[in-house]
Image (spheres, helix red, strand yellow):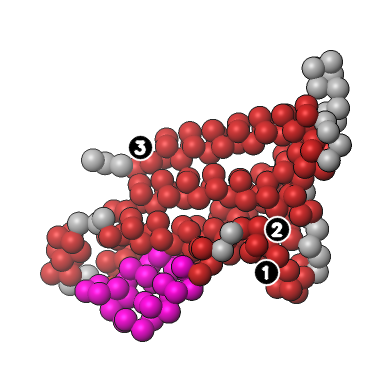
Amino acid sequence: MSNLFPNVEWDVMLASTGQTLYMTAVAVIATFVIGLFLGLALFLTGKGNLWENRFFNVITAGIVNIFRSIPFIILIILLIPFTLFLVGSMLGANAALPALIIGAAPFYARMVEIALREVDKGVIEAAKSMGSSNAQIIFKVLIPESMPALVSGITVTSIALVGYTAMAGVVGAGGLGDRAFLDGFQRTQNDVTFVATVIILIIVFLIQFIGDTITRRLDKR
């Protein structure tokens, strides 16, 4: 192995993999919670839905669209003051989390909204006719019925977050992106870049496999 990849320090690469997994896991959990909340807000305040409110819907949609449209590398720069306030540093895995979450949550929110729109209106009307409250319709009808699409959406978002962590690594967040850039690109050690890329691909394939498996088990069609 040392002959094939002479410049790879495996203990350092393992630590970088751990940093990437940490950033991805924390960001995915936060993105799921915030994105689900935003997606529900977008759907429920839309025309003809439970909490129809055009003003709130337009404001929420505007916020989501703005942050969803900003390229991630620019978002990191824009959030430097906010990140410094929260974390106290722009270096390290924790410093990447605000940008990762703020960048991914609006993206997932739109997926949540689309998933909720696909729920059969007849099921919602049936729940209303049986006297279900709005909370019961949301938590016992809308979310369970849309769960396969929600899981599929968070799978896609998780894969995007792995890519975001690589970009964050270039600006000092650590992880495999940092290793590929600092040791691989800047020092012209192509084997380091290759190994970091392969590990990222393995992580992506595992996320996709787990997401697809859960989606199939939840889909009752």
Tell me which numbered mark, 2 or 3, is placed earlier along the sequence: 2
Query: Which mark, residue 96?
Result: 2
Mark 2 vs 3: CB contact within 8 A: no
- Residue most extreme to the bottom: 55
Tell me which numbered mark, 3 or 1, is placed earlier along the sequence: 1
Left or right of 63 in this view: 17? right
* Viewer-nearest residue: 209 or 201: 201
The part of the image, by quadrant, that contains residue 77 is bottom right
Left or right of 178 in this view: 133? left
Looking at the picture, which amino acid does disc 1 mark? Leu
Question: What residue appears at the point 44 percent right and 74 percent down from the top-left corner?
Answer: 62
Mark 1 vs 2: CB contact within 8 A: no
SS category of the residue bearing label 1: helix
* Viewer-nearest residue: 170 or 121: 170
Looking at the picture, which amino acid does disc 2 mark? Ala
Q: Quadrant of the C terminus?
A: top left
Q: Position of residue 179 (x, y in %)?
A: 78, 40
Q: Which residue is mark 1?
A: 78
Question: What residue appears at the point 53 percent right and 39 percent down from the top-left corner?
Answer: 207
Tell me which numbered mark, 1 or 2, is placed earlier along the sequence: 1
Q: CA distance from mark 1 to mark 2?
A: 13 Å
Q: Which residue is mark 3?
A: 216
The part of the image, by quadrant, that contains residue 194 is top right
Q: Is residue 32 visible?
A: yes
Magenta residues (range):
37-65
Residue 53 magenta-drawn? Answer: yes
SS category of the residue bearing label 2: helix
